[in-house]
Image: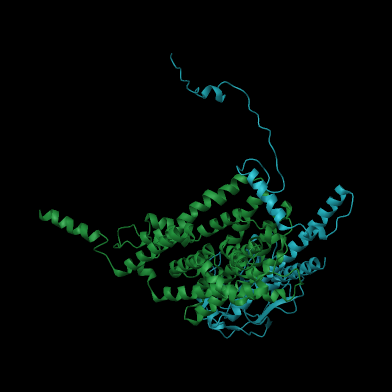
Chain colours: A cyan, B green
Amino acid sequence: MKHLKLFLAAVCLALCFTAGAQSQDAMRLNEYLVVNTDDFQDDFGQQNAWIELFNSSYGTVDIAGCFLSDDPANLKKYAIPGGDIQTKIKPRQHVLFWADNQPYRGTFHVSFDLSDADEIIFTKGDGKTIIDRIKVRHDLPENVSFGRAMDGIGSVDGAGEGWAVMERTSPSTNNTLVDKAAKPDRMKALDPYGWILALTAMSVVFLALILLYFIFKAIGNANIRAGKKRAAAVAGTDVKESQYGEIPGEVYAAIATAMHLYLQDDEGHDEESFVVTLHHTDRTYSPWSSKIYTLRETPVVNKRR
Amino acid sequence: MGHIIENLRQFWQFTGFANFEWGYLIMIAIGCLFIFLAIKYEWEPMLLVPIGFGILIGNIPLFAGLNVGVYEEGSVLNILYQGVQRGFYPPLIFLGIGAMTDFSSLIANPKLLLIGAAAQFGIFGAYAISLALGFDAAQAGAIGIIGGADGPTAIFLSSRLAPTLMGAIAVSAYSYMALVPVIQPPIMRLLTTKKERLIRMKPPRPVSPTEKKLFPIIGFLLTAFIVPSGIPLLGMLFFGNLLKESGVTKRLANTASGPLVDIVTILIGVTVGASTQASQFLRWESVKIFIIGALSFVIATFAGVLFVKFFNLFLKEGNKINPLIGNSGVSAVPDAARVSNNVGLEYDPKNYLLMHAMGPNVAGVIGSAVAAGMLLGFLG
């Protein structure tokens, strides 16, 4: 019971972490462009300011019902509409909003532009909890964006920590190019001797197998209790716990060997363990199947006198 | 006449003799050695015969353009090799392993799972050594998995993390798996006292069919939720086991554990062998991989045995575990368990450890798949 409680606590904890990671809290303002004269075009072929959001979690996040605003006094300036499948942002993916003050053009066109905005604020569905905010810089040249140096990394309080002027705009894609070799290289730089990875991975291996241990310990105990109850019901007496441990291994070995020998042809039983089904075998008589007609008679030597 | 001579000269250029290099001869000798070890000493013959012959196939001297080599796109061998390169043979082998594995001893005594976890130190010890020897992190991860003593997992991971080293890693993993009876016993004797070797463990309790049916389902859900990158291996392993234990899919279980796994074993063995072309294989890196591979098995055995000794400190008298089953935490099934049993019998002819050792042995299969998933998650 104690183990079961521990396990349930661990599962709850894991679920809490999972739920947290996949909530709207994981969304980040990731990049914006104020003056767009020669950059990305929207579906209408127009160049406008844009705001990029990034899902920093490893689960899909639905941002329907969240708010974007440029006014701290009115956090609900643009409500992201529901009912659009594109508001479900896949893990580690981006979404682009056009700050063109033309919300009737679709889900991803907000009701303000950035020409006079001091700040961009992304607010949770409750309309009060600010998830991320960033000051708008108006000193940047045309077609130069401002964004997080690494996707999703940096401050969320408007201080701009982790933000930088981008070498190139990257709407709806990674701010930094991630190539195949970068991940192992970063890992080696971070952990040159391999101890961090070893400890982390071993902890996970142990965690997985310890959880499995607790589950099957609990299931095993429940099974033993049920078995004892069944045995007691059959015998009409209580069965002592120690009796289970007292059956020597040789007995099991003998039973197993006997069953193996009996069932050697692999046709005698139809369920894997503990159940032996003996099928009645019909041998209908027919002269065609009768062996006696197929046997040759033993030669008899006739001695002539 | 001149035309005929010209044709004969061209024909000579095609032959293996004209393209001969000493590297090929060395590899052919290695292939013959594998076949000899498999036939003479029956060391992992199901693996060493296909790999050994694959080495012969892959090391016939050729010139590029004949479209027969394993690395020539579109050749028959190349098409068969896709199962290795793209990593779909290993999960199929895991399906078969699942369908032929009986997890009863583990379910009966689930604390043996922890030994299977401890032995995975071999993987990460080898990872650290590989980094120290100058391999990059992805290559080190692929080399480290040799310590899991699991051929399909090694192939699966190296195809993702370090395809150029796959031949050396696979051959190293399978070679040391075959050498488990040689590598492990001296370490086991070194680390245990005579008193410890004589520990008799409680016989495992009977396991109900319901528990056996639940194990693959719960085992998969739990491990896959924790390490989703291990799903191809873990999913197929537990699925195969469910086919076996469900009792209603006997035909499927028989196919998975019989003809299917045999076919894939042949294909994986031959193509991995063929991928060890001298030009790809005979490099200083391969020598280093073989050295690290040996060390990884040693570390895994050390970790498994020492973990049992440590674990025994917390167990009551009568519940103690014989440390000779610690080596079985590597997933060389059932060779490692057989080694535990044989070494145990040397000291007590009536102390059969085989069933107890099978617990950590199959736990090692799960543990190495989880560890592979972790490496893939961090480095892939």
Q: Residue furthest front?
A: A305
Q: Is residue B57 placed above or below A144 in the rendered structure? A: above
Q: Residue furthest top?
A: A305
Q: Which image quarter: residue A166?
A: bottom right
Residue B236 in the image, given as x and y percentages of width and height: 59, 57
Q: Is residue A304 placed above or below B182 in the rendered structure? A: above
Residue B361 in the image, given as x and y percentages of width and height: 61, 64
Q: How many marks?
A: 0
Q: Which image quarter: residue A44?
A: bottom right
Q: Which residue is depicted at the point 66% across and 45% down?
A: B248
Point out the image quarter for the N terminus of chain A. Answer: bottom right
> Can residue B187 be seen from the camera position used here?
yes
Q: In front here: A57 or A30?
A: A57
Q: Which residue is depicted at the point 65% across and 71% down?
A: B197
Q: Residue furthest left?
A: B1
Q: In front here: A305 or B228?
A: A305
Q: Is residue A292 placed above or below A173 in the rendered structure? A: above
Q: Is residue A206 placed above or below B219 in the rendered structure? A: below
Q: In front here: A19 or A177?
A: A19
Residue B136 in the image, given as x and y percentages of width and height: 48, 78
Q: In front here: B320 or B177?
A: B320
Point out the image quarter for the C terminus of chain A. Answer: top left
Residue A117 in the image, given as x and y percentages of width and height: 65, 80
> Can residue A179 be seen from the camera position used here?
no
